[in-house]
Image (cartoon, rainbow, N blue to C red):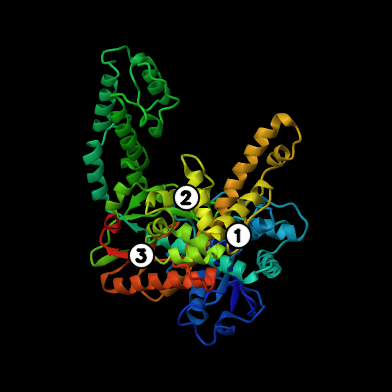
Amino acid sequence: MQVVVVPEADGAGRVRVLPDGPGPSVLPDPPGLPDAAGAPGAAGAVGAPEKVDDLAAWMAATEAAHAPRWVLPAADALYPDLLEAGVRLSRCHDLYLTEGILLAFAGLPGRPRNLAAAWARLHGLPEPDDPPPASRTEQPALFEADREPLPAGADPLDAAVAVYADQQRRIALVPQPDRLRLLVAAESAGALAAAEMRHHGLPWRADVHVELLTSLLGPRPSPGARPRVLAGLAEEITAAFGLVGAPESRQVNPDNPASVVRAFARAGIDVPSSRAHVLREVEHPAVEPLLRYKELQRLWVANGWSWLDTWVHGGRFRPEYVVGGVVSGRWATRGGAALQLPRALRTAVRADPGWRLVVADAAQLEPRVLGALSGDRAFAEVSAATDLYTTLAAEAFEGNRDHAKRAMLSAMYGGTAGGAGPLLARLRKRFPLAVDYVEQAARAGEEGRMVRSRLGRTSPPPSEAWRALAGSADPATERRSREAARNWGRFTRNFVVQASASDWALTVLATLRRRLANTDAQLVFFQHDEVLVHCPAATADRVAAEVTASAAEASRLVFGDTPVRFPLQAATVDCYADAK
């Protein structure tokens, strides 16, 4: 059963029940789906538009009776309000996210994805730009209507039905539609999971966070002042350059890169920048306090007291996730930098009393993905080990794990500096199919062609400026042309692996969400190849087992009958920091 929903003001909405068809999902149905799931029943007559005064209550009743596939203009604009009203959806088709996938597949990644734009394209009309992201910092009135105004004369519900039908038509026309259906289903499930993770929040002990900041930086400083430890390091840096008592214009400001570069120049040391990797190559007594200052200053600015005041409330950190926020399919966040949390702060992520954290982390995901993509049987045998690099080292690099890892990263990222070239040649000789797979992707990029992930997520085409440079016959631009081609080839080389890894990880998230639907467990964090579940202690063993089962199920769905092993190691802990 499929139900198209368009929210309206004051908690109302309009809905239309559609007959079952070749839906976007090849994921299994949610557990406990009623036998009458395909019948309209209380949900209303098939095909008849219906006005609903209390949309949240209507959707809750329909979800309980039929668990339909909800067709939503954009889940992130509607689902947070439903969660606040106590309504959880089992599955959906997100028109906005699907439109983005299909536009990219067609080589049109920059076009607007909103419902109004998709409807306009169907009718040859100008496409309105995507609206700015809705802020969730303050609770709005239930449902924000008219965020995506349609062209004059268009009915929002009819437009949603038409766009949904067109998306299904376009999916059916691709060479392997089931893969693209799985990607759409996983992306849409990801949108639901993202809203739920923000709703539940990541358990966060503010007192532990403050204690950590105080131990590393000293007491909270007054506005505009440096923390005590940073102020002491700044004095130590100035002293290391022999500038104590010098005029203020000559003293070193460690927050100002130009000031640091000038200080080294006065000491007879030429450095191109004050970046940490540059300073580590310099011998000078100021280097150690400078590096320490940089590390602590980054913590203070990115995750200090102000961050804690802004983002942690009621014992929860609630970032706003952006599903598919990166072209490879990885997520991003708006504010809070949830996907760049320093390892030191993981100690503040602690389960509630009587609850546990189940932390699952995929081991060496991208090399395993390459093995599955390429069908290299010899490489698949290496993947049987939990530590792939150790086995790879024994197979081809005389037991040198560092060499094995550098060769693998060189294959996936296209680097040959620092002696990686000979190591890559050895990897190519031992595993020709795996290396050839990424090299074909690199050649496609160098020629300006698009490449796709396992499920069909598509790389953006290069710019017109790139094409003009690459196609130039001017000998003066030949070097720049070759360099541009190689750079884009490195991008497409990695895209096929990283985007396919995103396919797998997102499918794991979707299957795990489905498996945990009838439990008290809460998905609370997801990034790239890692997922956190907050659950009652009594259910932790079951949750860990479901994590393992989800990884196996996702591997079958995404890669079929592959011999490559994808271990997703689950640790049950009270504190996130203890999982590593």
Q: Amino acid at mark 2?
A: Ala
Instruction: Give the residue type at disc 3.
Output: Gln
The residue that disc 1 covers is 96
Residue 558: image location, x then y, percent: 53, 68
Query: In the image, is 168 to the left or to the right of 563?
Result: right
- How many residues crowd around disc 3 within 10 Å: few (fewer than 14), some, or many (20 or more)? some
**From what the image shows, is residue 439 above or below residue 92?**
above
In-image side of 263 versus 465 (left or right):
left
- Sequence order check, earlier mark of 2 and 3: 2
Residue bearing the label numbered 3 = 569
Residue tagged by mark 2? Answer: 407
Foreground mark, 2 or 3?
2
Relative vertical location of residue 498 with respect to residue 511 in this rendering, above or below: above
Residue under the image location 40 percent in, 30 percent down: 278
Q: Residue at x 61, y 66 (%)?
A: 180
Asked whether 136 or 70 is in front, the reply is 70
* Quarter residue 516 falls in: bottom left
Amino acid type of the residue tagged 1 in the rendering: Tyr
Determine whether, in the image, residue 247 is placed left or right of residue 180.
Answer: left
Whole-percent x and y of residue 219? 22, 36
Residue 323 showing in the rendered view: no
- Quadrant housing the N terminus: bottom right
Question: Percent from the top left, x then y, of residue 443?
Answer: 64, 50
Q: Residue 424: which disc?
A: none
Chain-order first, disc 2 or disc 1? 1
* Mark pair 2, 1: CA separation: 39 Å
Dot 1 crowding, Cα within 10 Å, few <14, some 14–19, many 20+ = many
Q: Quadrant of the C terminus?
A: bottom left
Tell me the element at label 1. Answer: helix
The residues bearing labels 2 and 3 have C-alpha atoms spaced at a distance of 25 Å
Q: Between tags 2 and 1, which lies in front? A: 2
